Image (spheres, helix red, strand yellow):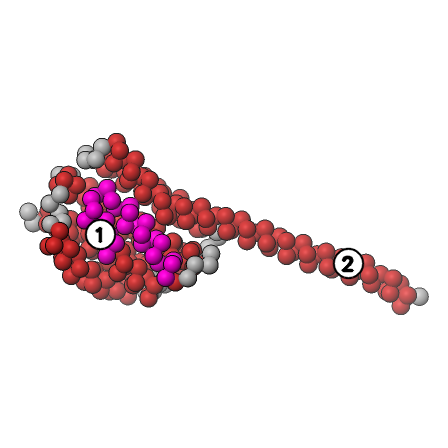
């Protein structure tokens, strides 16, 4: 009798097992779909928020005063905060997934210095050939208090690398883009986001952004990129003001 009961229950048990497996697969697929949706939102923030913010404030006034410049920087830092929130709470991924914490701090700072040195020669060449730094946008920027310029420099190093290197490159590759495409798409938008500073500023962003992208693809260390980017902008914008 026991064997007969087991035989009769076998199809029902099998059906329950299959149903549970299907439910598990569907739940997993739903979670992945939600995660992908969050990633797409994150990409919109990382690729386009800075461009939109710059355009809005440039429309308000092409030559920002201290209050307007600070408001713009606060908006950019806020956009970075939203992206970090999406990574940690939406995607539920660690910051290591965008290259933060990939190396010891001392090594990241050392490589950041290397990145800055690698950017100096092409930056100086572009500046000499184009007269970069003498346009209306540069003159307006130079009129800002040095502490505001320092905030802009810190924001540029941290937020721009977070947006256009760490997050954009990593997530575009996760979504299926190849190594080259996942580098070129953010680089093109990064360059376009600097057009409010003039054509030469966009060219400078394209060339130096290419170097920063190459280093990130090589080492996957976002902190070194942030520090290198900061050093380049600090040397170009803060040091001259300090010794003027």
Which quadrant of the figure has residue 142? top left
Residue lying farthest left? 244
Q: Quadrant of the N terminus?
A: bottom right
Our reading of the magenta stretch's main secondary structure is helix
Q: Which residue is mark 1?
A: 203
Residue 74 rendering spot, x and y as whole percentages: 30, 39
Find numbered disc 2 in the image and state the secondary structure of the residue it sits on. Answer: helix
Q: Is residue 45 left or right of residue 28?
A: left
Q: Which residue is mark 2?
A: 15
Residue 128 rendering spot, x and y as whole percentages: 10, 54
Find numbered disc 1 in the image and state the secondary structure of the residue it sits on. Answer: helix
Q: Which residues are magenta?
A: 180-208
The residues tagged by marks 1 and 2 sit, at their Cα atoms, a distance apart of 63 Å
Residue 62 shows in this picture:
yes
Few, some or many C-alpha atoms within 10 Å of disc 1 (few <14, some 14-19, many ≥20)? some
Among numbered discs 1 and 2, the one appearing first in the sequence: 2
Residue lying farthest top? 60
Q: Is there CB contact under 8 Å for labels 1 and 2?
A: no
Residue 131 rendering spot, x and y as whole percentages: 11, 50
Residue 109 part of the magenta segment: no
Which quadrant of the figure has residue 10? bottom right
Residue 33 rendering spot, x and y as whole percentages: 55, 51
- What residue is shown at x 34% (from left), y 57% (from top)? 184
- What residue is shown at x 91% (from left), y 65% (from top)? 4
């Amino acid at each position: 009798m026991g064997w007969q009961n087991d035989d009769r229950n076998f199809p029902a048990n099998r059906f329950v097992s299959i149903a549970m497996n299907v439910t598990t697969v569907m739940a997993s697929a739903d979670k992945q779909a939600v995660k992908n949706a969050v990633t797409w939102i994150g990409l919109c923030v990382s690729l386009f928020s800075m461009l939109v913010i710059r355009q809005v404030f440039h429309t308000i006034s092409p030559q920002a005063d201290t209050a307007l410049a600070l408001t713009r920087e606060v908006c950019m830092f806020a956009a970075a905060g939203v992206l970090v929130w999406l990574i940690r709470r939406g995607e539920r991924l660690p910051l290591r997934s965008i290259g933060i914490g990939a190396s010891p701090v001392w090594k990241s700072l050392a490589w950041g210095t290397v990145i800055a040195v690698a950017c100096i020669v092409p930056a100086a060449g572009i500046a000499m050939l184009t007269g970069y730094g003498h346009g209306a946008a540069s003159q307006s920027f130079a009129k800002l208090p040095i502490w505001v310029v320092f905030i802009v420099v810190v924001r540029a190093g941290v937020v721009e690398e977070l947006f256009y290197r760490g997050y954009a490159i990593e997530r575009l590759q996760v979504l299926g883009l190849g190594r080259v495409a996942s580098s070129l798409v953010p680089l093109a938008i990064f360059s376009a986001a600097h057009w409010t500073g003039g054509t030469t500023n966009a060219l400078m962003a394209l060339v130096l952004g290419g170097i920063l992208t190459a280093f990130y693809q090589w080492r996957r260390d976002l902190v070194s990129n942030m520090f290198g980017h900061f050093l380049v902008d600090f040397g170009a914008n803060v040091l001259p003001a300090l010794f003027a």
